[in-house]
Amino acid sequence: MNIIVAVDSEWGIGYKGDLLARVKEDLQNFARLTTGKTVILGSNTLATFPGGRVLKDRRNIVLNPDPEYAPEGAVVVHSLEELFACLESLQRDGLRLDDVFVIGGASVYRQLLPYCEKAYVTVFRRCFEKDVWFPNLDELPEWRLVCESEPVFGKFRGAGGAEGEISFVFREYSRVKAAPLFA
């Protein structure tokens, strides 16, 4: 399983329920990696998408404890156990776990990071105001940096309406050994 996230220079990921920045090239990279794949997300993350609708051309699995929660076009699971059972069933039907991407938010990242083998991280070379963080993979011995792109330059639109130029890199990390999803 994979995780994909965009962080600022201090590994912040969000502010007041929104992304720190929207950058066209980062969103294109996200689409390139996740289109045609399975994405796992929380309901708060789904609510930030245009119209609160699921991502098209992907299987969307939403983790939410509310039994009444039923967004159109999504598979809803109510616990990690239910998620793992769902993934195991999909795997029997041909799903490859390396085609599964955890896309947020913070709670879902926290719960599923131990089960991920790869992390695709966009690192904005800028510090934003933030109230949510992602673990700094550079400081975790179980993760190693596999590759990093040359710096990319683009324009950002930030939480609160800020806009400007930004530089960033795309990184890929690999876990030394992920926790098994299935017994």
Image (spheres, helix red, strand yellow):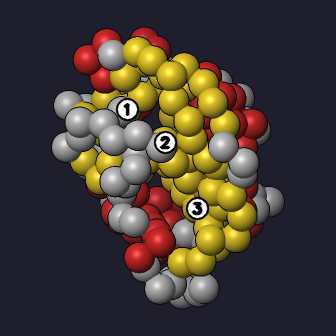
Describe residue 92's horizontal placement relative to residue 181 as left or right. right
Q: Nearer the viewer, mark 2 or mark 1?
A: 2
- Residue at disc 1, secondary structure: strand
Q: Give the Cα distance between marks 2 and 1.
A: 12 Å
Q: Give the Cα distance between marks 3 and 2.
A: 15 Å
Up-down relation of residue 20 to residue 105 (above or below) = above
Relative image position of residue 27 (x, y in whole percent)? 60, 29
Q: Which residue is mark 2?
A: 124
Describe residue 123's horizontal placement relative to residue 79 as left or right. right
Relative image position of residue 84 (x, y in whole percent)? 50, 66
For the N terminus, the quadrant is bottom right
Q: Which residue is mark 1?
A: 19
Q: Residue at x 40, y 15 (%)?
A: 163
Q: Residue at x 54, y 78 (%)?
A: 143
Q: Earlier in the sequence, mark 3 or mark 1?
A: 1
Q: Nearer the viewer, residue 22 or 129?
A: 129
Describe residue 130's horizontal placement relative to residue 82 as left or right. left
Up-down relation of residue 51 to residue 32 (above or below) = above
Q: Give the Cα distance between marks 3 and 1.
A: 18 Å
Q: Nearer the viewer, residue 163 or 76?
A: 163
Q: Nearer the viewer, mark 3 or mark 2?
A: 2
Relative image position of residue 17 (x, y in whole percent)? 25, 32
